Image (cartoon, rainbow, N blue to C red):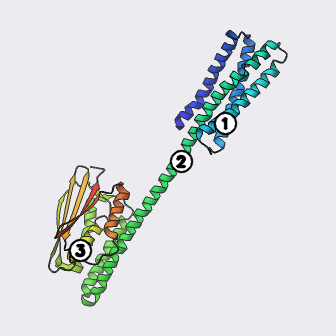
Amino acid sequence: MALIYKHLRWLLPLLAIIIWCLEAGYLHYYEGLGIDIALLDSSVNMLVLALTIWGMLLVVNAYPTRVGATLYALLIGSFFAIAAGFITWVTLKFIFRNQDHSYTDWLAYSMPIRYFSDWLICGWIATYSAIVKEAETIEKKFLKQNDLTNLHREAELYKLRQQLQPHFLYNSLNSISALTMIEPAKAQDMIGKLSDFLRTSVKRDGQERILLDEELQYIEAYLSIESVRFGDRLHIVYEKNYQPQTEIPPFILQPVMENAIKFGLYGKIGQVEIKVFIRQQDNMLYISVTNPYDKDNQPTRGTGFGLEGIKRRLYLLFSRTDLLELSKTDTTFTTTLSIPQTNA
């Protein structure tokens, strides 16, 4: 729109010259006016019209459009067309005041046509200018709204990431507190691993996507902490099939694993197996985490942040609501993540 408007500014002077020539030719050849009168008449008419259009554009650009563009252009165009016609009539009548009455009579006769042509020209230019201005205003509002939306999105993603670590940290500190009395060595080991884990988390914060290999290394660090709590009871089985450049949002797997451990190990004795299946197909990465499930023996639900937080993050990142799927049987519970790949 701005490009068209820029070219129109060069087109208008050219159009004015063409109209001036056509008007002078018409007055001379069809109305029978002398060439000097025809040139002077058309010159005055075009000069007044040009100044009127210039003033009209200043008004259109200076004052906001409080009504519709069409009505606004009609009002502005009509006002300036009447002004242009009146100034032209007064100016020509003054210039040719010593001429015979034939020209002044013809001038009075031609004024309705002049008013109408001025109204058409002013109305068209005012309409176009008002539409351009309204379009630019809408575009600015859209860009501002888009910026606000992006800021809100980034703020919410940051909030979700910041919620994740305290959620895990509280659980770890509770475990350390319990271990300090019965197994101080394990508590000390867990504190060291937790320190390394949180240090790695700080380095990753702020990244929107990381390599899947890095996320899995992060998960291994997380599981090493959990292994202090559960010992040999926790057994993770992986099945992987993906490309080396595969990427994933950071911190997206930890809540899934935490949920699987919480609901898989609760109320059970002996070793518990959690299966992690990772496969890539075309432009989509699928990660499924399956844990044992017993509908009659489940822990009390917490804040519900984990999986709901993942669902919200995936929506904010990919604008899709179908990227988190939960399914269960009588004995298993499966969480499946679908991560679109832009570099596949």
Mark 2 residue element: helix
> Residue type at mark 2?
Lys
Badge 1, how many Cα within 10 Å: few under 14, some, many 20+?
A: many
Q: Which residue is mark 2?
A: 140
Q: Earlier in the sequence, mark 2 or mark 1?
A: 1
- CA–CA distance in space, label 2 to label 1: 24 Å
Q: Between label 2 and label 1, give the one nearer the viewer.
A: 1
Q: Residues within 10 Å of mark 3 (few under 14, many from 20)?
A: many
- Residue 289 is left or right of residue 143, and the answer is left
Return the disc, 2 or 3, that comes first in the chain's sequence. Answer: 2
As shown in the figure, which amino acid type bears the numbered disc 1?
Ile
| Mark whose residue sits in front, 2 or 3 | 3
Question: For the residue marked with disc 3, what is the amino acid?
Answer: Phe
Task: Please identify the residue farthest to the bottom as the structure is shown.
Answer: 181
Asked if the residues shown at circle 1 and circle 3 are in contact, with their CB atoms under 8 angstroms apart, the answer is no
**122 lies above or below 106:** below
Name the residue: 46% across, 58% down: 151
Residue that carries the numbered disc 1 in the rendered image? 76
